Image (tube, rainbow, N blue to C red):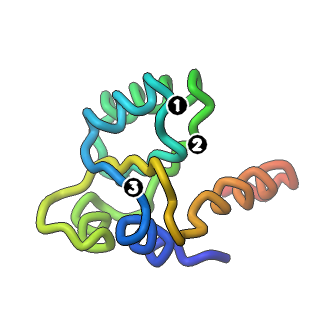
Amino acid sequence: MMDIDKAISTAVKTGKVSFGANSAIQSAKTGKAKMIIVASNCPAEIRSDLEYYCKLSKIPLIVYRGLSTDLAAVCGKPFLVSALTIREPGDSEILRLVESKETEEAEGGSE
């Protein structure tokens, strides 16, 4: 199992990542994201918008288990991060998370 914290941290340092719900929604609408990650305490309205646009654009959406404060700490940011858009993963293998998740779901091992 991949360490999601490490993968997010690497993507932030070496890839192209933008922070914020508005940016994430815009990226989902235009299909410019490779992946979107939302904190577990992301407001329900924003989360449902993101789920809808991600489904339309076929962009994987991952719900981070921690709060926005935890996500901010992983990203090394001094502000809350409720949503994070990965445009380029850089040296991170975070996009493999989606592949392993799809495999789990196909095998019936989803949480």
Q: What kind of element bears circle 2?
A: loop
From the viewer's perspective, tell me whether residue 107 is left or right of residue 36: right
For marks 3 and 2 on the same chain, the one whose residue lies earlier in the sequence: 3
The kind of residue tagged 1 is: Cys
Q: Nearer the viewer, mark 3 or mark 2?
A: 3
Q: Residue at x 45, y 24 (%)?
A: 30
Residue 60 disc label:
2
The kind of residue tagged 3 is: Lys
Contact, mark 1 vs mark 2 (Cβ under 8 Å): yes
Q: Which residue occupies the extreme left position in the image?
A: 78
From the viewer's perspective, tell me whether residue 31 is left or right of residue 84: right
For label 1, the crowd category at 10 Å Cα-Cα, with few meaning under 14, some 14 to 19 and many 20 or more, is many
Residue 16 disc label:
3
Q: Which residue occupies the extreme right position in the image?
A: 107
Contact, mark 3 vs mark 2 (Cβ under 8 Å): no
Q: Which residue is drawn at 47% across and 34% down?
A: 32
Expressed as whole percent of the image width and height from the top left, the position of residue 85 reads: 39, 47
Image: 68 above or below 14: above
Expressed as whole percent of the image width and height from the top left, the position of residue 23 reads: 29, 36
Which of these two is toward me, 67 or 59? Answer: 59
Mark 1 lies on residue: 54
